[in-house]
Image (spheres, helix red, strand yellow):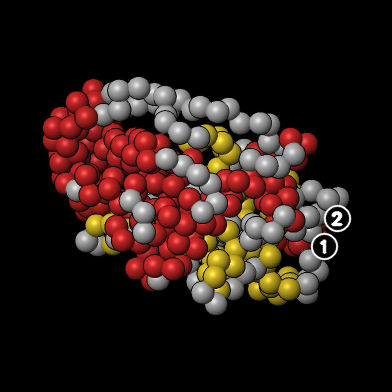
Amino acid sequence: MSVLHWQHIDDQVVSRVAEAFGLGRVNTVAYLTTGLMNRNWRITTAAGTFALKQIVDVPIAVARRNLRIAGALAQVGLPACAPVFTIDRDPVFELGEHGYCVLPWHDGDHMQGPDLTVSQAHHLGAMVGNIHDRLNSLAPSIGLSPATSRCARPVTPPHVAIEDTHRYRGAARAAGGPFDHAVIDLLDRRVALIQTYAADRPTTEDAVGPCGWTHGDLQYRNIIWRYGQIGAVIDWDRIRIRPFAEEIVRTATIQFATPDGLDLHRVTAFVTGYRTAVPIDNAALADGVHRLWWTRVSNFWHLVYHYDRDDHGCDDLLLSGEALLHWWTAHRSDVCDAFTATS
């Protein structure tokens, strides 16, 4: 799919959406290039400035549920970016085969790890903890059934991961472009990594520690800072039951990644902040670090999007993610110590 086609939205579609949400006349429409999974535009209308999203990455029914949950979290004090509702009190407007939602526009910055002070890293961790606490305290009538106390997480066997490398190597050779040549080199290194560390993979699918409803994609693109504080948490598409440690580790390893590895000092501050809101012990955190490391070793999600879905929106994340994986592998003990320390 071409970038230009991905960016385009028909003027009549925008007008229909604006009418459904009671936004009045549309003045401007600008595509947002920072969204990775859905299609997003900044629109200005007679009613103000909004983010318009075409729902692509989750079923419409799930998006509708999750938007209502975000609204409920906003009502209890979290910066959860409550959706705009249609005149029929629906957070999603369906037009043809597509679903659309509208959210208030939040000015601010998407701050990556080195841009955060240690105090802000602590604040971010506390916010993640508060999200976990409030998500799992909502009444079931809002749409979330009580979570189970334990979670099973699949562990990819080494032979399956290596089979995936063969498939993607074939796809890359067939395509033959500069990106594809880089993929072939990357896959050669990944096979060596899988073979070297196959015996270090998790031995059970049972995750250690508390499980519950989680945001699912807490990373800097979905966190808006304003005046040094978190002003809004956006993109609640992936609300799902997971081990809390999984989201803690995923958030920190994305947020505090640098060209030279992870900023482990800020990782520790982040986890310490989380623990002010939700208790979690070192065994759960160590298990979360171990599991996500092996997931990164054995998973090829960038290539799923590129080759299987013909979606190139995440291509620029591939090489930086691979560099971080190799750094993490070389510093596994230090990374685990950072997550289980106290600042």
Q: Which x, y percent locates residue 332?
A: 22, 44
Residue at image location 33% in from the left, 39% down from the top: 286
Instruction: Determine the residue located farthest toward the right in the rendered image.
Output: 88
Quadrant of image for the C terminus: bottom left
**For mark 1, does the 10 Å Cα neighbourhood hold few (<14), some (14 to 19), or many (20 or more) residues?**
some
Q: Which x, y percent locates residue 326?
A: 20, 47
Q: Secondary structure at mark 2?
A: loop
Viewer-proximal residue among 310 and 342: 342
Residues at circles 2 and 1 in contact by the CB criterion of under 8 Å: yes
- How far apart are the alpha carbons under marks 2 and 1? 6 Å
Q: Is residue 97 left or right of residue 163?
A: right
Instruction: Determine the residue located farthest toward the bottom in the rendered image.
Output: 227
Q: Is residue 93 above or below residue 27?
A: above
Q: Which x, y percent locates residue 156?
A: 32, 26
Sequence-wise first label, 2 or 1: 1
The amino acid type found where label 1 is placed reads Gly
* Residue 159 in which image quadrant: top left
Residue 22 is marked as 1
Residue 66 is marked as none
Q: Is residue 120 left or right of residue 41?
A: left
The amino acid type found where label 2 is placed reads Ile
Answer yes or no: is residue 280 visible: yes
Residue at image location 58% in from the left, 59% down from the top: 233
Which residue lies under the disc numbered 2?
87
Q: Which x, y percent locates residue 217?
A: 49, 49
Q: Is residue 198 left or right of residue 134?
A: left
Q: Secondary structure at mark 1?
A: loop
